[in-house]
Each structure stands twice: as C-alpha cells, then as structure tokens.
Amino acid sequence: MASVPALKPTNTLVHQLGQTVVEMTVAVGDLALFGAQVVRLILTGLPRRGVMTQTFYEIGVRSIPVVGVTGLFIGMVLAIQAYDQFHFLHMETKLGAAINASLVRELGPTLAAVMLAGRVGSAMAAELGTMRVTEQIDALKALGANPIQYLVVPRFLACFLLIPLLTAIADAIGILGGWMIGSQVLGIDSFYWWLHSKEFIAIYDVQCGLTKSFFFGGAIALVSCYQGFHCGAGAEGVGQASTRSFVWSFIAILVLDFFLGVFQSGLYYVLWPDPVSLF
Amino acid sequence: MSIDFSHFDLSAAAFGEPVIELRGVSRVFGTQTVLRDISLTVQRGETLAVIGESGCGKSVMLKIMMKMLEPSHGDVDWFGKALRQRSERDIHRDRLKFGYLFQSAALFDSMTVFENVAFGLRHNTGMSDSQITQIVHERLRDVGLPQSASDKKPAELSGGMKKRVGLARALALNPEIVLYDEPTTGLDPIMTDIINELILRTCERQPVTSIVVTHEMSTVRKVADRVVMLYPLSRLQPDEPQIVFVGTAAEAFSSSDPRVSQFVHGQARERLQELAAA
C-alpha cells in the first residue's frame, strides 16, 4: 500500500480536509492498482477448480435466500405503496408495468447489490482481514502461493459472474411478489397487469439492470478484498475493515449506479429516439 | 550510517557458502524505525539463533529474509544473488527452498490438518493424490502426530499440536532453509523441549540451514551453532549498531556485555527501576 505523505499536523479545517483528500486519492489509486493486479492474474491463470467451486458456492448458492427475500419484499412494498397513486389516476392496471420497470432497471440490481455488499462483502473483508492478522496470508506466500491469485481472484470472479444471476433471481421474485399483492390483495386483473408490463418493459431494460450488476459485483469484490488485505491489527482492525468494506461498497454502488444510469439513458435515446410512454 | 562489525566473526567459516545475506537493511513502519542498517550472513548448514527483547525487530528481520516484507533500505541476497535483480518467477522458484514456521503456526483455519500440510505440495508440484498423502503422513509422523489428527481442524488442536502441524507444513516441500519464528513461545517446558528436539532432528535428517528467532534460552542452548542478538533501537544511540552480539551460545552466556548477559540470564536489573519510575 502506498504511504500517505505526512502533512504538518494542524487542526484547521482546511488542513484536515486536505489530508482527507490526499488519503482518499491514495486509497483510490491503491484500489485501482489492486484491481489491475487482479485482472492481470485472471488473464495469467485461474486457481484450482476446488478453490473456485467452493468460493462460487459460498458467494452464489448461499446468497439465494437473502436476495430472494430482498426481491420479494421490494416487489410487495412497491405494490402496496404505489397502488393509491395509480388508483387515484384510474390506472391500476398499469401498476405492474411501473413496478416491474423499477425492479429490473433500478431497484432490483441496486438493492440486491447492497444486500450482497452486506452479506458477501463484509464476510470477505472479515475473513481476509482475519487471515491477515493471523499471518495466514503470509503463510500462503511462504508456501509459494500468490495470495491475490488464491484468495481474491476466485472471490472477484464469483461476485462478477454470480451477482448478475442473483440479481435476476431478485428481479424475478420481486416481480412475482408485486403481482401477488396486486392481483391477490388489491384485486387488479392479472391479464392487464402482464399485458402492460410486456408493452412497457423492453429487453433493453433487463439488459441495463443486469449490466449494472456486473459492475456492482466487481466493485463489491474489489473493495471488500482490498479492505481485508489492508486491515489493521487485532479484532478491532478486522471489525473496521468489515465496516469500511460495506460503507465503501455501498458508496461505489451508488456512484456506479448514477454514472451507468446516465450512460444507459443516453444510449437508449440514441438507439430508440421515440421511447414508449407509460401514459 | 556505517557500522563497524570488525569485532564480530561474521564469516562463520565452519559452514558452507552464504545462503541469505542482509546488506545494510533497514525497515521503517510509518515514523517508527524497527531495523537499522542490519548486515548479516547466514551460511549453508548452520543453525543461527536470533535473540533479543520483544519489539527489537527479530520477526521483521525474519520476514525480510523470506521476502514477506520489503526492506525500506538495503539489499537481501538469496544464494549469492540480490533479490532486487531477480525476476518474480526466479524468486518464486527459490522461495520454495524455504520453509517457515510462524509464531502462531498460521494454519489455514478453513482446512484440516491434512490439507494444511498438503497445501504446498498441491500448489507447487504435480504430485498425485497418493504421493501427497504418503508425504503428508510421513511429515506428521516426523513431528510425532498420529494419522488420526489429519482430519482435525486447527481450532481443535492444542498450541503444541498447532506448532507441530506448522512444522510439518513447513517441511513438506523438503526445504533447504527453515525459518522458525519463536517456535516455542507459549508452550509448556515439555512441549518446548519436544519442539527443540524436532528442530535438531530436522537438521540431522537432512542438510538444512535453520534460522531460529527465539526468546527461549533453552532453545538457544540446544539448537544454535551461532547466536545473533538484536537490541531495541529505542535503547540505542543513533551511532550504535543494532546487532550487539554475534558468537556461539556458550559465548553469549559468558558475555561481559551487560546488554547480552542481562538478556540471556533473564535479569531485569535497571528495568525494574524504570518500571517503578513510570
């Protein structure tokens, strides 16, 4: 990790702000170098199949319940909360289109990624941090293994490849949850629910949501593994690494969501200058 | 800063060629200097004990020797060639000639004892599962552990057993050089003697160079051909060398240097007054 140049100690707000900016710039640079190293190692060779399978199972299969519950409740809550507005406009049958569009484009990918930053990211940071403070990462080096290749590459690939799949599961369960409340509790006709959804949601919307989740998955893995690798000493250091991993993953998800959203919207109007309107 | 080592016999002529050499190595963490201008040669076949108070930089020096930490200044040579001039591949190949027993054993807690010992073999050799199984069982037997221990997780082992598994793992690849970081710290006297005996047996079984970082004077007496003592920089003047003693174990015990005799005989002396003053 690059060292932060020592600034003259002072308590003025400007100096503290400057020190924070310098530290953040160094951290972002370190993270970029860390990411470049991970990509280089992916290109030069993957760890053994057993290591990959175990990591994919831990990150992918064991996250299904969490993303399922997240998706289900997002869909159900959206249906309950948006119903009154749509009812006021006598457009209840289009509620499904609005819910499903929100889910596949925005809420599904973002909230699933936030849940996974908590479940997977914090666990990765804590696990790698514990390995660091108990010298297990040094032991890997001593035994001729590259710790980044052995520990980070499988986690990065699992998050990058499986978080989009988990997002698709969250989207699907969320859509079913919204429909269940809309049709079974609020009495909206299922035929029109699905008809308007089909008219309003294009394959591009699904692609946009899933494309975002590739970036979210990569960001969660890099931020969390980086925090684990650079964690401070003792239980306190591991706890801080875990907390920082969630906070920085969350921020990375929001920032990426904004810029990818801007890019995807711009691209949409380039590809389809006359978009379909909900109203 | 240049340090005069002329009063020390660093050549250790009774042993083979240099396998590890530190040349003017310093290491700084943040604003704290832990090692300052250390020059030291480890000869093939010798068992070198590195002693000194807690925090004087012994473990840091061992990690720099193994290239697990980079020196802030100075150079490290392996087998007569500077690491700075070597490729990553070259360093990786030579690193497999080293075995490292960690202070805490550093066993992979998600793996069983068997998997821990097999790790280096699986990762670095193309051996079949049956060959690996045979070697792992041999190594576990060498350190006095039964085959039944091989399915246990590190959390189920006692401190002494963890150290022995760590030693079996360090020896699995038949290293030429074994580095022991406080191998007996936290163990009872009997287990300490068992570990000392295992270090000796390892040296007898195969031609191995050993570097043992320890506080335990029974270990020094039993295993060391040569002793190096480091002193904490906070207690030294800026122009004093950090290595305050190089010699045999017997010379260490009869040393007239108060810093050395105080440590090897375990006498706090003026430190008790410092404690009272604090």
Image (cartoon, grey):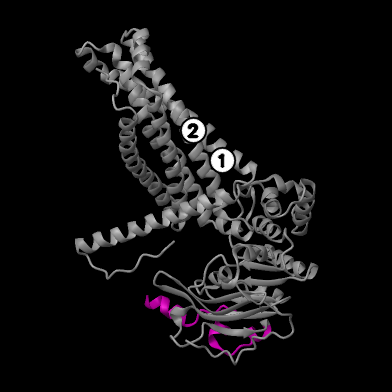
Q: Is residue A231 visible?
A: no
Name the quadrant containing residue B30.
bottom left
Q: List x then y, in percent, for residue A215.
A: 42, 40
**What residue did someone put label 2 on?**
A63
Q: List x then y, in percent, for residue B84.
A: 56, 72
Q: List x then y, in percent, for residue A152.
A: 52, 49
User: Measured along the vertical axis of the image, is residue B87 above or below residue B244?
Assistant: above
Which of the two residues, B73 or B200, is positioned nearer the viewer here? B73
User: Measured along the vertical axis of the image, is residue A9 above or below residue A88?
Assistant: below
Q: Is residue B139 visible?
A: yes
**What residue did someone put label 1 on?**
A55
The residue under the point 47% across, 35% down is A163
Name the quadrant containing residue A85.
top left
Pointer 2 indicates a residue of which chain? A
- Left or right: where does residue A238 sit relative to residue B112? left
Q: In whole angstroms, how far apart are the C-alphas of marks 2 and 1? A: 12 Å
